[in-house]
Amino acid sequence: EADIYQTPRYLVIGTGKKITLECSQTMGHDKMYWYQQDPGMELHLIHYSYGVNSTEKGDLSSESTVSRIRTEHFPLTLESARPSHTSQYLCASRLGLNEQFFGPGTRLTVL
Amino acid sequence: AQKVTQAQTEISVVEKEDVTLDCVYETRDTTYYLFWYKQPPSGELVFLIRRNSFDEQNEISGRYSWNFQKSTSSFNFTITASQVVDSAVYFCALTKSYNTDKLIFGTGTRLQVFP
């Protein structure tokens, strides 16, 4: 069983608020990822990291930003949330060439 | 371009029925990897299987089995004697090579198993 955690699990906020979605893993995995899952269920990669101080943008353009100061921690920040950001956000991690393990997700609603 | 198609949006079965989830992929690469993930109502994606393009052997794990056919670019997933706990969304995914970080997901198939 993967040890990857996301908080909060659910978040409802108003437009214009700054939010940070937390993702932590205790497995020592070097690679971490953020996916956005729209209501139609499709998943899109928005950010990834190969290790500390490494961040890259994924296939889907996103207004969010990420940081990787510690191996185990990969937070995602939205400076000014909008209703279009309403979605489920899934964090994943991977060690070397192994498969990706996913966290439980954060369901974000922006009013 | 790479693409994964899961044509079945939703499938409903009664417990103990067998069910097959279809996955068709497109890629021009000779080396690639295919995956199946399960997403239960709790939200996380659970890894089920990984298969590389050079290994066309079918695999069986308990009630789960996978049929990989390069000739038809398909990687189908069968659940035998389905159970209510199998109710979830199932995703098929493709990656260009094992070292790439880009998983290309299909749109998922929602399976509902009724008692």
Image (cartoon, coloured by chain):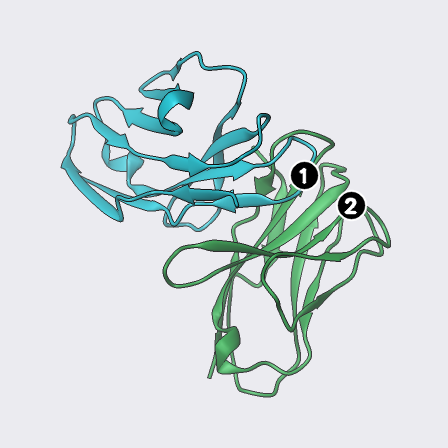
Left or right placement of residue B88 versus residue A14 in this view: left
Q: Amino acid at mark 2?
A: Tyr
Q: Residue A65 appears in which quarter of the rendering?
A: bottom right
Dot label at residue A89: none
Please state the chain letter of the residue tagged with numbered disc 1 in the rendered image: B
Q: Residue B76 appears in which quarter of the rendering?
A: top left
Give the class, few, some or many, for how many residues have Cα within 10 Å of label 2's Cα (few <14, many ≥20): many
Q: Residue B77 appears in which quarter of the rendering?
A: top left
Residue A27 sits above or below residue A49 on the image: above
Whether residue B114 is visible, yes or no, is no
- Tell which of A8 and A71 is nearer to you: A71
The image shows residue B11 at horizontal and vertical percentages of 21, 42
Give the number of the mark in front: 2 or 1.
1
Q: Amino acid at mark 1?
A: Thr
- Tell which of B31 and A20 is nearer to you: B31
Which residue appears at 47% of the width and 45% of the height? B105
- Tell which of A54 and B38 is nearer to you: A54
The image shows residue B2 at horizontal and vertical percentages of 51, 43
* Residue pointed to by mark 1: B100
Residue B115 sits above or below residue B67 on the image: below
The image shows residue B92 at horizontal and vertical percentages of 43, 38
- Colour of the chain lettered B: cyan
Left or right placement of residue A37 versus residue B63 in this view: right
> How far apart in space, not on screen, are marks 2 and 1 (Cα)?
11 Å
The image shows residue B102 at horizontal and vertical percentages of 62, 45
- Colour of the chain lettered A: green
Asked if badge 2 and badge 1 are on a common chain, one would say: no
Screen quadrant of the N terminus of chain A: top right
* Residue pointed to by mark 2: A50
